[in-house]
Image (spheres, rainbow, N blue to C red):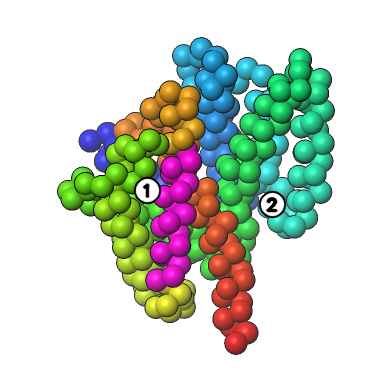
Amino acid sequence: MKRFFAGIVLIPIVVALVLYTSLFWLTLVITLITLLALNEYNAICGKLKGEQTQEIYNFKTKRDLFVLVFGGGLPLLFLYLSGVATLPFLTFFLALLFLLGLFTSKNTEAIFEVIKNAIFGIVLIALPLSHLVLIGGEEKGRLWILLVLVVVWSADTTAYCVGRIIGRSKLCPSVSPGKTIEGAIGGIIGAVLAVLIFDYFTFLGLGSVFAVALGFVLALLSIIGDLIESVLKRSAGVKDSGTLIPGHGGVLDRIDSLFFVVPATYFFMTFVLVLRQAN
């Protein structure tokens, strides 16, 4: 019931923010979500290293602070610069990260650990979420962001329902025992139907073939993102990434499906549709 009522409250708020705020305020919301997700990621990394923390929302090391500052600033960089123009900043980030590991670690293994954890967090969380800013700045970009959310919500809901009703074959028992192959198939079908219906009512102009292909690919990527977060949590021995959202866990638990879906949607929107129009 907590999960249901939290969704009833949050979904209208999220839709309103996507459709009716300026790009600047939308970017600030994305930045806040990024910071919360990275903070949870830092805590999970701490648990992987054996740190005994009671509260998931904290940071203890210079690495954690560095990840929060740079990762949280990435959506703002994408707002004021293009995606390509941020590449020099990413290079600068890698150099600073190496220096951070060099001067705060006692041995080469610790240096590598700092660099690996920080890069993985930035690439997995901050970089994909920053692509929402790029999508939002395009023509009909807000509808595309809403499409991403509708696809993920539909895939998650149908996968859960189908898995609970007829799920028998485990999808990846060592990582996520509750997920089934039947549920995954149901999620893919739900995502495809969601894209077809969304395209019909919003006039995005995808067409049946592109809509089915997009729904199928995004559903698969959504499942992969969810499994990656499950690997992180299982390795750290935690059930949820946090407790911020009643019945849902933490922010990272709610956005894991977006890790690969958002960049794929941006690629599809900017390249595939351009090629289609050119032909």
Q: Residue at x 57, y 81 (%)?
A: 276
Tell us which disc is closer to us: 1 or 2.
2
Q: Which amino acid does label 1 sit on?
A: Ile
Instruction: Give the spatial CA distance, label 1 vs label 2.
Output: 25 Å
Look at the magenta stretch and give its main secondary structure.
helix
What residue range appears in magenta?
A: 212-229
| Label 1 neighbour load within 10 Å: few <14, some 14-19, many 20+ | few
Q: In the image, is residue 226 part of the stretch drawn in magenta?
A: yes
Q: Residue at x 23, y 52 (%)?
A: 162
Query: Can the viewer see residue 18?
Result: no
Residue behind mark 1: 11
Point out which mark residue 2 bears.
none
Q: In this view, does 84 lie to the left or right of 165?
A: right
Are the residues at dot 1 and dot 2 in contact (C-beta closer than 8 Å)? no
Q: In this view, does 16 lie above or below 42?
A: below
Q: What residue type is labelled 2?
A: Phe
Q: In the image, is residue 252 part of the stretch drawn in magenta?
A: no
Q: Is residue 88 left or right of residue 240?
A: right
Query: Can the viewer see residue 263?
Result: yes
Q: Which residue is drawn at 67% across and 37% down?
A: 119
Callout 1: SS: helix
Q: Position of residue 196 (x, y in %)?
A: 36, 71
Point out which mark residue 78 bears.
2
Q: Residue at x 68, y 52 (%)?
A: 79
User: Of 187 and 247, which appears nearest the observer?
Assistant: 187
User: Of 217 and 144, which appears nearest the observer?
Assistant: 217
Callout 2: SS: helix
Q: In this view, does 154 lie above or below 30?
A: below
| Label 2 neighbour load within 10 Å: few <14, some 14-19, many 20+ | many
Q: In this view, does 80 lie above or below 235?
A: below
Q: Position of residue 106 (x, y in %)?
A: 76, 15
Quadrant assignment for the N terminus: top left
